Amino acid sequence: MYKVLLVDDERIILDGISRIVDWEGAGTVLAGTARNGIEAYEFVSVNRPDIIISDIKMPGMDGLQLAAKLHADFPDIRVVLLSGFGEFEYARSAMEYGVKHYLLKPCNENKIMEVLQELVGELEQERESEQFVRTMREGLEKVLPYVKEQFLKEFVTNKTYGNRDWEYYRHLFRVDLGSRHVRLLLFHLDGPFEFEHLFAVKNIAEELLDKTVLSSTVGDHVLIVVEDPEELSVLLERIGNIRETFLRYYRIDLTIALSEADVITRTRKLFKQTLECLNYRFYLGEGSVITERDILGLTTESAESGDLNFNEEHLMLQIKTGRWEEASREIDLFFQRIAELRSDIATSQSYVIQLFMAMIRLGNSDDMSRYMDQMVKLMQLDTLQAIQAFFKEAAEHITLLHYEQTKTKNSAIVSKVIDIVNNHLGDPELSLNWVAHQMLYMNSDYLGKLFKKETGEKFSNYVMKTRISKAIDLIEQNRDIKIFELAEQLGFGDNPQYFSQVFKKYAGCTPSEYMKSN
């Protein structure tokens, strides 16, 4: 129901119109009455009506003055003026105050009802229009974020979009950059992720970045357009906060490409720039911020000017001999050389595959078959860091396999040496050179190092300790045995004095003293 205020300085007219009009039938309710314009305005200020029916001639503030004041302060209120025949031309001047309806005195209830119904119809139509506009505006507000995202996606990937399109959407999105430049941030998720993670990155970035202009997901990346800050260090700090926050919550690292600054109509060029930056993620690794300055000079032409300088045979030797620490250092050197060369990605991968094939040939048949199956996985790795980690894992397995084989082989050799020592304790010719050359046909230096590595002591020292241990056993078995007999039986020949010196060195006393003490 619409509220009506009736204004007239004659009480008879006020009471008469109040009683005879079917207010409810017209879709209205009589909210109040006033005797002049001043009372009417005070009423409006407290209880705002929808329609005012007012006489023109009134003391204090007449109807025209009231209409003018209402038009200025409450333009939505509909005003109906009551005028005599002689006042009609005068009343027409109220049109400039938005007054469209007039009633000539005397007027009956039917005339008043017609005007009220017409005004109610106007108000209903206006309310419906306002509701429609409000609904449309609310709907636009809901879809506007999606429209922004789609526009940005099309603007950076579709060549048909140009400056005119930006001008239209700039007004639609209420974006006014003036002459200020923008920068693009392209986020790449390092490792497996779900589609929801893209939106998480987008939301975190929009929350932590200042002056975000537009944002969208483009394929497997998140694209953010921000105003170029006065201090680039501030933007870099906030980018770092985004990466740390996302890594803390989702355990996924981010690589971010940051474009140079330019006008927003050149966003397509800036987007290509960020894609080129991400290509060098292969060399610069995961979890980094890559700018155009980082990739200056890292072109294919620079890679073609040099070859990979690496001694493959030296690495293969470390693997075959089971020396993992040395092999690990060689592998790190290999990947360092690749990173310094800055070849295109395909060329770098070919260097790795070539060395990988040479390495897995050193493994057994099962290992070689398994690593051949994993070749596809190796080719799919998108950073040099990841390829290096995969390569070293395989290399360590093969190197340790050779280490175990070598260790078993060496243990067998050392066991044979110990058997020879035990069987030839009485031979004065027993020495490392004699065992190596006459018995095992090996290099004596290598055999000596191998013996010490396995037993923890030098060959000559082991022989002397074994001879003295055997001498003590012989004394225990035969207390009457002569010292010169012990010397002859244990390889000291006819030099019992030297035997006694050696015995004292290892047993702490001479053979004679040992015999007396027992």
Image: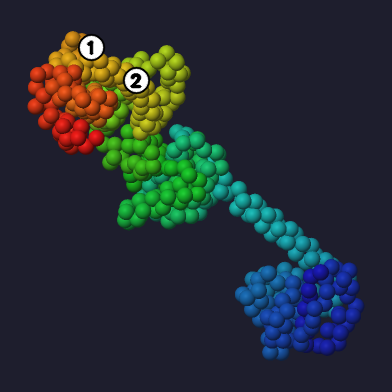
Residue 422 seen in this snapshot: yes
Left or right of 481 in this view: 122: right
In this rendering, is residue 154 above or below 75? above
Residue assigned mark 1: 440
Instruction: Using the rendered view, name the quadrant where residue 126 is placed.
Output: bottom right
Front residue (pair 320, 504) = 504
Q: Position of residue 10 (x, y in %)?
A: 81, 88
Q: Report the Cα–Cα distance between label 2 and label 1.
A: 17 Å
Residue beneath the point at 42% across and 50% down: 244
Residues at badges 2 and 1 in contact (C-beta under 8 Å)?
no
Q: Earlier in the sequence, mark 2 or mark 1?
A: 2
Quarter of the image where the C terminus is located: top left
Crowd band around label 1 with a 10 angstrom C-alpha radius: few (<14), some (14–19), many (20+) = some
Q: Amino acid at mark 1?
A: Leu
Residue beneath the point at 90% across and 80% down: 19
Q: Position of residue 23 (x, y in %)?
A: 86, 73
Q: Which mark is residue 408?
A: 2
In this rendering, is residue 219 above or below 118? above
In this rendering, is residue 439 above or below 482? above
Front residue (pair 59, 243) = 243
Q: Position of residue 425 (x, y in %)?
A: 21, 18
Q: Amino acid at mark 2?
A: Thr
In this rendering, is residue 394 above or below 41? above
**Element type at mark 1:** helix
Quarter of the image where the N terminus is located: bottom right
Left or right of 427 in this view: 318: right
